Image (cartoon, helix red, strand yellow):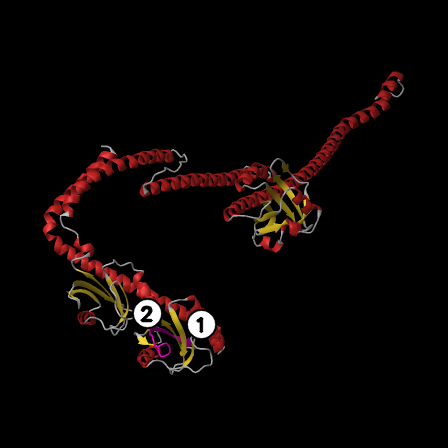
Amino acid sequence: MGFRRSLALLVIGTLAPLLVFSAVAIYQYDRARNAAAEQTLLDASRALVLALDRHFEATITALVVLGSSEHLDAADLAAFHRQCVRAIEARDEWRAISLFDPSGRRLMITTEPFGSALPGPPPVMSEPFRRLIEGRTPNVSDLFESPLSRRHAVSVGVPVMRGGEVRWVLSAGLNPEALGKLVTEQRVLSDWTATIFDRSYRVVAGAGSPSRIGEAGAPGLVAAARGVAEGTLRGPTVEGTPVLTAFSRSRAFGWTASIRVPVAGGVFGQPVRAILGAGAALLLLGLTVAVWAGRRISRPVEALAHAAQRIGRGERVQPVESGVTEIAALSTALVGASREHTRAQAERAKYAERLDILHEIDHLIISGAAPVTIAEAVLRRLRDLLDVPRAIVNLFDLEKGEVEWLAAVGRRRVHLGPGVRYSLALAGNLEALKRGEPQIIDVRSLPATIDSQALLASDVRVYMVVPMIAHGELIGSVSFGGPTGEFPPEQVGIAREAATQLAIAIAQARLQERVNHHAKELEDQVRVRTAALEAAREELVRKERLATLGQLAGSVAHELRNPLGVIKNSVYYLRMRGAEDEGTTRHLAIL
């Protein structure tokens, strides 16, 4: 079922029972309208009392502000008199401002020059004045006749405290006519009569039918108002007109407001038959409005449904124009949800990029990559994530007081490896960096050196230095900057995370470098020692060979010496036997 048809059925289903019910309930209308009249008048009287309370509270607030004047602290009553005169000029409803001491003696009044003889307070004010002093709370008097102007007035008084004690009483005399304007501003109907009474139930102000200020209230109203704080009553006026009267008493100040209306007039005298005549016209009008409103509402609703589908696909949507407040609010909510969805996606992407950068650094650390390789792999992505024109990884040489680039990425160029050095003073407070505190450097505040001029030439006005600390030792920094000095906390957090991981990578690489150096030294030492041992072994082998040859030669000589001795003895013997034989002699010579 379409929205327009549903809306038409809704109108019929709503109005038809109401018309039937109205037809059945017409005979009860008189009693219902009387109850509604009483409630309406009672609400109106409550609203009038509330407006009266606010008026008095505003006056009390103004007097409290005046009471805090430094002129009173300095006992400069002449200056305070001038200040009160200026306050009177700003408030038309005030006639005069008076200052009393706690005993009731008048110290000044704005209607008389300062220093002139002043009358005492009216006798009717003695009891309210005593209650104000004892209670130390602001109060509003009943209607009285001013001793100076001889006109009716109302006084609002506040205690002025110093050191926990009442030092003065500051009061403002109000025009009853101003309270009459307050009644008029409530916009009561023309046949309504609104009246304000003080605590003694004398008329202070009124609107509608004229009432004389200072008159006592009607006896019936006074009797009813003394018994309860609010209510309604019926009865004739002095002229004999039947009226309905509602009254309500202020809990804060005890004043009473009443509104009366003729029972047979005003909004309560409409013919009962108007209900029946309006029923059919209302039903027809409702159906017409339902069809028109259905068309006016259904089209934006369909557009909102399509917008919701686009949000589900991650697309941005535009507001749907509609004169219906709820649909416009729903359209605004959908647009906000679309923006929030887009923002959340961007944040998730940025967070994923942060994790990916840190993961890549960890991976390169595990693989044993060199620091410059790690910086090259992540620095460009880090610059894009930070959304800055330049990002640099620096290494500190604390002994020489210098900073050296490990890697730097700008808008167009990438620098890798050592070669660029500058003073450590450009890194900010070194002790703060050692404590892990990032430094914000304004290049224009640095001394005019080649390095600072180079930064300004590259449009870097402000940059941040985030320390890289490994095992409690400051080894370098990640610095980034640009023409402005705005560094959001999220940006600083990303730089800190990257700096921490890079510090670990650099420390790990330095440790690996030291391990490799020690390993090479040990390898060289082992090689030298091995060569020496090899030479000693060869020398030992040579000596063992010589000893073996000596032993062999001795054995051979011994073995040869035994047969030679036999031969020698035999030759000797043969020479003795055959010395004369020439041939034998020749052979023996050979032997």
Is disc 1 surrounded by few (<14), some (14 to 19) or many (20+) residues within 10 Å? many
| Type of secondary structure dominating the magenta stretch | strand
Q: With respect to residue 590, does 288 lie above or below?
A: below
- Residue 99, image x and y in percent? 41, 77
* Of the pair 580 and 239, the residue shown nearer to us: 239
The numbered mark at residue 176 is 2
Marks 2/1: CA–CA distance: 20 Å
Does residue 10 appear in the picture of this structure? no
Q: Residue at x 29, y 60 (%)?
A: 186
Is disc 2 surrounded by few (<14), some (14 to 19) or many (20+) residues within 10 Å? many
- Residue 170, image x and y in percent? 40, 75
Q: Earlier in the sequence, mark 2 or mark 1?
A: 1
Residue 158 painted magenta: yes
- Residue 577, image x and y in percent? 85, 22
- Residue located farthest toward the front when viewing the structure as drawn: 239
Q: Which residues are magenta?
A: 146-161
Residue with the mark numbered 1: 84
The C terminus - image quarter? top right
Q: Left or right: 332 with respect to 531?
A: left
Q: Amino acid at mark 2?
A: Pro
* Of the pair 261 and 253, the residue shown nearer to us: 261
- Residue 69, image x and y in percent? 46, 72
* Of the pair 149 and 89, the residue shown nearer to us: 149
Provide the secondary structure element on which disc 2 rests: helix
The numbered mark at residue 351 is none
